[in-house]
Image (cartoon, rainbow, N blue to C red):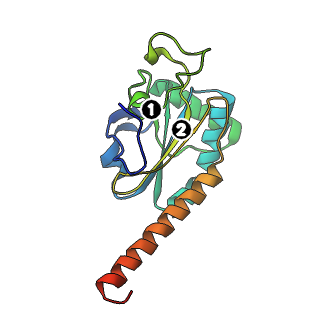
Amino acid sequence: MGQLKLGDIAPDFIASTTQGTLNFHQWIGDQWTFMFSHPADFTPVCTTEIAAVAQLQPEFEKRNCKIVGISSDIVEDHEAWLNDIHEIHNVQVQFPIIADADRRISILYDMLDVEDSISFTSSITQNLFNLRTVYLIDPSKKIRMSLTYPASCGRNFHEILRVVDVLQLRDRMVAQRLASCKNGTS
């Protein structure tokens, strides 16, 4: 698959998560979606990022924006990791974490770090490092924002909330403008 671009329809998939089977497009429904990837469970940066997003979940919900994480481990590891996050950060993770041990979804969404010479092997599915990728997907399933950090760096989730605000404000302004044009009051 080629690189996904802004405006592309987000690829649909079915995956196992910490909250059961997820049919991605059906799960999105008519909401915005914030999807973010992680290299592996139990790493310090990944752990603090999941905790930070769990703390910010009410802010995403105010914006009608669902959250889904993805990591290259199995569901049972994710569940143990979420217990660890609760113990360390005293926060309950209420959003699903996708299990992507075979890297099927990471490949579909171009989330693998093929430049990481330490982790890259001859088989891309054995690559241990997903990039830290973010996708914002709107209710029509279009990719509205993508952002990629190296595996070694953490992300600023307040910035992602700001982008959600900007995109939603723009959509409201466009809708108002179209409504005024239809009514002949531009």
Residue 165 shown left or right of residue 185 in the figure: right
**Residue 185 percent coordinates (x, y):** 36, 90
Badges 1 and 2: C-beta atoms under 8 Å apart?
yes
Mark 2 is surrounded, within 10 Å at the Cα level, by few (under 14), some (14 to 19) or many (20 or more) other residues, namely many
Q: Earlier in the sequence, mark 1 or mark 2?
A: 1
Pick the residue in front: 69 or 103: 103
Q: Quadrant of the C terminus?
A: bottom left
What amino acid is at disc 1?
Asp
Which residue is depicted at the point 56% across and 57% down? Answer: 163
Task: In the rendered structure, find residue 133 and report the number of the disc placed on it.
Answer: 2
Q: Could you tell me which residue is drawn at 43 percent across and 49 percent down?
A: 6
Residue 106 lies, in percent from the top left, at: 44, 30
Disc tally is: 2
**Mark 1, residue position:** 110
Mark 1, secondary structure of its residue: loop
Residue 146's place in the image compared with 84, above or below, is below
Which residue is painted at 35% across and 58% down in the image? 30
Q: CA distance from mark 1 to mark 2?
A: 9 Å
Q: Is residue 44 left or right of residue 80?
A: right
Image position of 120 (left or right of 52)? left
Q: What type is the residue that disc 2 sits on?
A: Thr
Mark 1 is surrounded, within 10 Å at the Cα level, by few (under 14), some (14 to 19) or many (20 or more) other residues, namely some
Could you say where residue 55 lies in the image, as x and y percent from the top left? 63, 50
